[in-house]
Amino acid sequence: MQKGIRFRAYPDRQQQNLINRTLGCCRLIYNKGLAMRDESYRNGVKAGYSQTSAMLTELKKTPDLAFLKEVDSIALQQSLRDLDRGFVNFFQKRASHPQFKSKHRSRQSYRTINQGDNIRIVGRYLKLPKLGYVKIRKSMEVGHINNVTVEKTPSGKYFVVLNVDFEPELRPNNGGTVGIDVGIKDFYTDSNGNVAENPKHLEKSMRKLRREQKKLSRMIRSHVTGYHEGDKGGKIPVYDRPLAECSNIRKQRLKIAVIHEKTANQRNDFLQKQSTMLVRENQTICIEDLNVKGMIRNHKLAQHISSVSWSKFFNMLEYKASWYGTDIIRVPALFPSSQICHCCGYKNTAVKDLSIRTWECPVCRTRHDRDLNASINILNKGLGILA
């Protein structure tokens, strides 16, 4: 198997400049390759990775783009590989049409391949092509490195993600069985009666985030000198100077990026701990096969559903289950887990109302907590599917 390991990197000033230039060159080649393939499609000519790779070779020969020779050539090729993969996913209807990249995107990264052991860890340093030895915060031992992704976050931090060979060892678990009903008020309730509270990291930082975003909005409006009509209608603001040259706006955007980064780190830490605990304690975990993407279309709940990150939580459970030998059973989303009495099987359609948190079964007179009853039904349904 393969897995990714993320380390914080501390490049010096020259290495930072080279990383930023490499990011810009990869973005340039990606956009030129996308424009070439779109134009070829309009002209009825087939263009794939081979044609874009030949285009890259020609671009390096032009005097105006001679700076492409100064960065990692493998990284430029990998950007074209990513473009080709994007078109494959698009034609197979797994993704939308590839879009042009902007330097203002939240995530800036490039990938390079380990060839001839040109990428290796030496003590506290990681040797990378063109960059040389970059200081990293190494938190664990790694195996053979296949490729490395160099990332620059919006807050200005640098990370390296190592794709390494991984030999999973089946670790013992406590052999339990559990059903999980996820929610918004409580992150999840399991069939054993345990409740994990929703930490609501985004909601807790929203007040500060809203204040800083208002400051940024006022700064941007202060540079507006007028408006002009856009190609598709609407008014486009005209600024007295490029916003990238405004140091106060750059500083304010950095403050907002730091808040978002802290929230994401808190959420990821919580999900990692909860998923690891569940996989270590249970042999069989039953979860709902939720269509989270469709649920987010509900604008009243979209922010709360995105904040709890159910999809990421389920993904963590699945890949960690392969390490521990745990079974993950997905129960169909249409299964009415909240409406069925787990004692006698009576179906109470009135429980479709989400405001009903407790209800009494009219047949067996059992008093149910909505989430606990749902988790028990999910467990029973999952065990039936497994059988």
Image: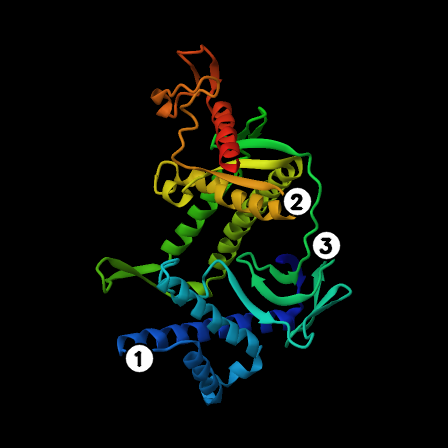
N-terminal-most mark, 1 or 3: 1
Horizontally, residue 300 falls left or right of residue 253, namely: left
Residue 131 in the figure: left or right of residue 328 = right
Asked if 207 appears above or below 59 in the picture, the reply is above
Horizontally, is 25 left or right of 8 in the view? left
The disc at residue 45 is 1
Mark 3 crowdedness (10 Å alpha carbons): few <14, some 14-19, many ≥20: few
Count of residue discs: 3
Quadrant housing the N terminus: bottom right
Measured Cα–Cα span from mark 3 to mark 2:
22 Å
Residue 37 on image: x %, y %: 35, 75
Q: Nearer the viewer, residue 281 or 103?
A: 281
User: Dot 2 lies on which element?
Assistant: helix
Residue farthest toward the front in the current orientation of the protein: 387
Closer to viewer: mark 3 or mark 2: 2
Q: Secondary structure at mark 3?
A: loop
Tag 3: amino acid: Ser
In the foreground, 135 or 283: 283
Residue 224 can be seen, yes or no? yes
Residue that appears at 59% across and 36% down: 284
**Mark found first going from the N terminus, 3 or 2:** 3
Q: Residues within 10 Å of mark 1 (few under 14, many from 20)?
A: few
User: Between disc 1 and disc 2, whose residue precedes?
Assistant: 1
> What colouring method underlies this structural image?
rainbow
Q: Which residue is mark 3?
A: 139
Residues at marks 1 and 3, CA–CA distance in whole angstroms: 50 Å
**Type of the residue with mark 1:** Val
**Identity of the residue furthest to the right in this view:** 123
Residue 3's place in the image compared with 339, above or below, is: below
Q: For marks 1 and 2, give the one nearer the viewer.
A: 2
Q: Which residue is mark 2?
A: 324
Question: Residue 271, percent across and down?
Answer: 58, 41
